[in-house]
Image: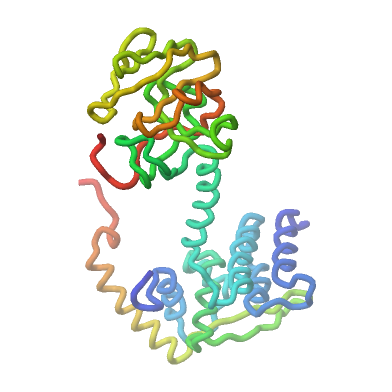
Amino acid sequence: MTEPWLRRAARRTLVLGVRGRGARGSEWGEALIGEFEQTSGSWEAVRWTLSGLRATWRAARVPRRVRVRRRTVVAVVAAVAIGVPVNAYAAGVAYIPSGSMEPTLQIEDRVLIDKLSFRWSGLDHGDIVVIQDATWGTGSETWIKRVIGLPGDVIECRDGAVYRNAARVDEGYLADGTVTECSAVTVPAGEIYVLGDHREASRDSRQLGTLAAAGVTGRVLTRMWPVRPAG
Amino acid sequence: MPRIPDSSPQTLKVFGSLVDDPSAWHYGYGLSKQTGLAPGTLYPILARLVERDLLETRWEPSEQPGRPPRHLYRLTGDGLELARARLAAAKPRAAANPITATPRTAS
């Protein structure tokens, strides 16, 4: 009876794995080769080869001193493999550089940014967004503002309050006594009108005008640090 | 990780097989069959025991020409002592934990 091809392949793999190009491999590798002939059938032979090679390689490749626990390696690799793309495309943490969103967000707060879902669900009134727009500031600055107007909205200010399409915008998030002054504008298609919550300090669509919605890179989900009761 | 060295269930299985016939030389394949351990688990255990002189090894030339020699294992005096101590220590622990010691029966 001729030997099944799978069994022959398993033997060849084991010998090659243990000896490489040399005539003799490690003691334990040779021990595995010695026992290979005892296995019966193709599958047992394949299992013997795979499991045995795993052991000899593990012992040979890494000297004991540098051996890192497998769980640690798996955790680090998984964290990088998942974390890097997630951080780049899906979510991230941003740092609030200015007081223009006070009292909602303070300087040095850390916020969690969702960089993905708004691309499907679209933006909504009241969303706090992260903006990078070539026409705003130096073009490389990151702005954090609240969406007040979406395409087609008419934004105006009366008696210190913001009106959208002739209806007063309920802005419970503002500090008491906040007065907003602005000139009326109709938001063009593909653009948004944004304001900072700290109306006295914020530079936003009141001075800079509407900006392309494509400049939005993320939406603030929640404040991560410090933990304060939501204003 | 076990607190006591050489007391993992896998090592105990290997000890169990070796202690059954302590004066005989054991083959790796036979140990693998008896213990149900894959070579990837069994051989590192054997290697650790050899490193600490608990296990002695020898090569047996093949009777059939062209076949590779086989590696054989036997506990040393120290090894036998340790194996018996570990197996004895493991028994009361298994008895104290009836969930793993006895199969569940429907009642």
- The quarter of the image holding the C terminus of chain A is top left
Q: Is A52 situated above or below A152? A: below
Q: Identify the residue shown where x is 47% and y is 87%.
A: B54
Q: Identify the residue shown where x is 50% and y is 32%.
A: A131
Q: Position of residue A36 (x, y in %)?
A: 66, 68
Q: Is A73 situated above or below B59? A: above
Q: Is A168 situated above or below A219? A: above
Q: Position of residue A174 (x, y in %)?
A: 28, 28
Q: Is residue A196 left or right of residue A130?
A: left
Q: Nearer the viewer, residue A36 or A184?
A: A184
Q: Position of residue A37 (x, y in %)?
A: 68, 68
Q: Position of residue A163 (x, y in %)?
A: 35, 13
On the image, which quarter does residue B96 sit in? bottom left
- The quarter of the image holding the N terminus of chain A is bottom right
Q: Identify the residue shown where x is 48% and y is 64%.
A: B36
On the image, which quarter does residue A102 sit in? top left
Q: Is A53 situated above or below A229? A: below
Q: Identify the residue shown where x is 46% and y is 21%.
A: A193
Q: Is residue A89 left or right of residue A175?
A: right
On the image, which quarter does residue A46 sit in? bottom right
What is the count of numbered marks?
Answer: 0
* In the image, farthest residue toward the left: B107
Q: Nearer the viewer, residue A208 or B52?
A: A208
* In the image, farthest residue toward the top: A166
Q: Nearer the viewer, residue A222 or B58?
A: A222
The colour style of the image is rainbow
